[in-house]
Image (tube, rainbow, N blue to C red):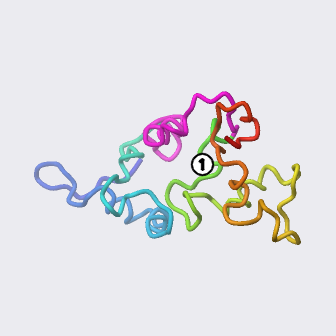
Amino acid sequence: MHQPAPVRKDGMTRTPATELCLTCHASARKGMSQRSRHPLNEGKMDCVSCHNPHGSASEAMVRVDPVNDLCFSCHEEKRGPFLWEHAPVREDCRTCHNPHGSNHDKLLVARTVQVCQSCHLQGRHQTVAGVPEAYWNQNRQCLNRHAQIHGSNHPAGPLFQR
């Protein structure tokens, strides 16, 4: 539970929600200044869009449990239903994405190839040093070939290619 914020006579806090949150949550402040982030700086959302500062039964006072339901409320195209689902998408979006911000594309916790390798190091094709010209090591790395990584309804779906 949080400490009470200074309040005005009408019972409201003196500080906007996000500004108040960032006085203590330095890592979230850092995320807001990174290359890939949610639109908090633009005022399109604030901390209470995802968190309930007055308490929640879920981890990190997230408004909705499981957290994926919260993510899908804005990113519905990632929800499915898909005939072929990528397990991390079904389990927890935070497996691959950092919701507070990242210097990697699309809020990823690391470079695309590193995120994929964290589970798929031994696969059909290796994406390790020594083969820099390999198709899957260039540009969008794994996503060059597996563009529908969140899920697919296409017959080639198990490979998340279409």
Give the image quarter of residue 129.
bottom right
Q: Is residue 11 left or right of residue 161?
A: left
Q: Nearer the viewer, residue 15 or 104?
A: 104
Give the image quarter of residue 81.
top right
Q: Is residue 144 above or below residue 93?
A: below
Q: Is residue 55 magenta?
A: no
Q: Residue furthest left?
A: 9
Question: Where's residue 36, x and y in %?
Answer: 50, 63
Tell me which amino acid carries mark 1: Arg
Q: Nearer the viewer, residue 144 or 105?
A: 144
Question: Where's residue 149, x and y in %?
Answer: 66, 45
User: Which residue lies under the disc numbered 1?
Assistant: 94
Q: Is residue 86 magenta?
A: yes
Which residue is pictured at 56% across the width and 68% down the height?
A: 103
Q: Is residue 3 above or below residue 68?
A: below
Which residue is pictured at 77% across the width and 64% down the height?
A: 137
Which residue is pictured at 49% across the width and 42% down the height?
A: 71
Question: Where's residue 46, x and y in %?
Answer: 34, 53
Q: Is residue 85 left or right of residue 33?
A: right
Q: Which residues are magenta?
A: 58-87
Q: Is residue 14 above or below residue 154?
A: below
Q: Nearer the viewer, residue 33 or 36?
A: 36
Counting other residues with Cα less than 10 Å from the Cα at mark 1, is it few (<14), some (14-19), or many (20 or more)? some
Question: Where's residue 156, x and y in %?
Answer: 74, 35
Give the image quarter of residue 78.
top right
